[in-house]
Amino acid sequence: MSIPGTYVGDFAPYWHPVAYSHELTNRPLPARLLETDLVLWRTSAGVAATHRRCAHRGADLAAGEVTPEGVRCGFHGWTYGVDGRCVRVPSQPAAPISPKACIPAFKATERYGLIWVCLSPTPKAPLPEWPELEDGSVATVPLPRLDWDVSAGRLVEIILDVAHLGWVHRGTFGNPEVQEVPPYDVERLPEGGLRTRIVYPALAPSLEGAPPKVDRTTLTYDVTLPFAARLSFKPTLFYVHTVYAVASPISEDKMVGFYFSSYHPRLRNHFPELFVKSELAILEQDRRVLEGVRPKAHPVDFSSELHTRADRLPIEYRRALIALRTGQPVDGPAPE
Ligand code: FES
Ligand SMILES: [Fe+2]
């Protein structure tokens, strides 16, 4: 499973979200990460993640039950603890349990309203640091999962893509009158992350059929490798909000996106509904473009595509991701 130099092996030692917290109730929940089928469940100490198939006859543990001892298979009642070891075989309760009666277990934790799993026992990096989500100053609202037929790297790249706004997002917030991208800087953060700030003349919807207003919106992009992006929108006419997007790789060609926004709690009667509606319209524009892009896999070099100065942030992201995979710094085509 974790062969270095393969897609799965390269990204196995990182934390990835596999579910929203609210999806994990008192039932086992199936999940899939990096070509691995998982079952998640809640314990008195937190959350657990193991392989989804029972070691006895391969039954689906996600169809079983959660007990104080662990997850119990619905076929013959074998029960597995958080370490994946079988602790109960009801058909022969007095016999010792074979050490072979175990399934792979993985590190799992819960933070920012997400369940995160690392398929390696030694994660190479911590979770993203988003302290503003934990100090009580903001509320959050999640979107339904983005179950898109695209790779994780390509989703992050389109979020970081400044030049597509006036094209892909016509009719939502993109400004078709402004296509030129002024030069901007990208700051490389010590842990390999990236940060950029630009001012974008977004179109803010206006009421009663009047033409939309141009609102010079400050966009602050903040990337945590491998697949997490925080994007803050600071308009002049409207309130600030920050979106958090994390692409969870199912395989090299497929991801599920977890996407939520923070907002000031005083806006609770308006913001969540507005956000979900408008953001789903914006993301649908991205999905239509991105699912048509080939190859689906996120390229691991720069030679098969063309690059401009406006692509600086996606280029820097791709450089950082290649460096993360290979352990070597990589040159990019962008002017420094
Ligand atoms: S298949 Fe799970 S207990 Fe038999
Ligand atoms: Fe977009």
Image: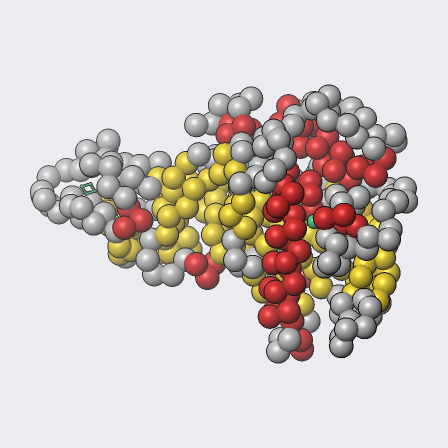
Q: Is residue 125 above or below residue 210?
A: above
Quick one: quadrant of the C terminus? top right
Number of numbered discs visible in the structure rendering? 0
Viewer-side residue, 48 vs 263: 263
> Residue lying farthest right?
182
Nearest the eye: 176 or 221 = 176
Q: Quadrant of the N terminus?
A: top left
In the displayed structure, does residue 43 sit left or right of residue 155? left
* Identity of the residue drawn at 35% across and 36% down: 104
Relative vertical location of residue 305 with respect to residue 108 in this rendering, above or below: above
Is residue 136 visible to the viewer in this orientation of the structure?
no
Is residue 18 visible in the rendered image? The answer is yes
Q: Position of residue 170 (x, y in %)?
A: 75, 54
Left or right: 21 with respect to 100? right
Residue 58 is situated, as x and y percent measured from the top left of the image, at 24, 37
Q: Residue at x 54, y 45 (%)?
A: 148
Please tell me which residue lies in front, 224 or 248.
248
